[in-house]
Image (tube, rainbow, N blue to C red):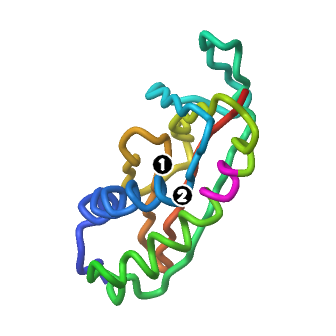
Amino acid sequence: MAPLFDSQDLVNQLALLAEPRLRQLLRLGSARHVYDPHPGLPGSKYFAAEGEVLLSGFARAVEPYQNIERFLAREKAISFLVEPGLLPIAKAIATEARGRRLLVTRKPAPRPTDQGATAHLPGIGVRLLLHTGPETTLTWECLYGAL
């Protein structure tokens, strides 16, 4: 049975809903945030004025949903789709940035095995991947490093 929603529209909407919430959760304090829009892999490097930053952190949260249509209303989407994916990502990034002066995030490079609709949180480097099938999965990924 075909889903009752457009996958690409849904991940685009989730990315727009998630961006302000992630910024609120991060509270970087003294760390300056730099977003590198070029896709990368764990272990890649970013060259900043402060020095070389190894992007060794890779956070991933995968949430399975049997009937994702139940959560398409805005309030439910934030509570049941955005929050469960963002919290582990925000915790990993905030832990890495604690006590550091520079945080670099980069969107993860797509893998050949990726299937589904993809979106990116603007200016942060978090990638969303929505795969629909017998079981719908919503994957949140971020590549980051700190100096």
Q: Main secondary structure of the magenta part?
A: helix
Pick the front one: 102 or 69:
102
Task: Give the labeled residue for mark 2.
Answer: 140
Q: Residues within 10 Å of mark 1 (few under 14, many from 20)?
A: many
- Is 67 above or below relative to 124? below
Q: Helix or strand or loop: what does disc 1 sit on?
A: strand
Q: Amino acid at mark 1?
A: Arg
Picture coordinates of residue 34, whole percent (x, y):
52, 28
Q: Which amino acid type corresponds to the residue marked 2 in the rendered image?
A: Trp
Question: Which percent across, then down, holds residue 139?
Answer: 53, 61
Q: Which residues are magenta?
A: 90-94
Describe the element under mark 2 as helix, strand or loop: strand
Q: Residue at x 64, y 29 (%)?
A: 102
Residue 28 at what x, y percent from top left? 59, 45
Quarter assignment of residue 84: bottom right
Q: Quadrant of residue 17?
A: bottom left
The answer to whether the residues at label 1 and label 2 have Cβ atoms under 8 Å apart is yes
Circle number at residue 127: 1
Quarter that holds the C terminus: top right
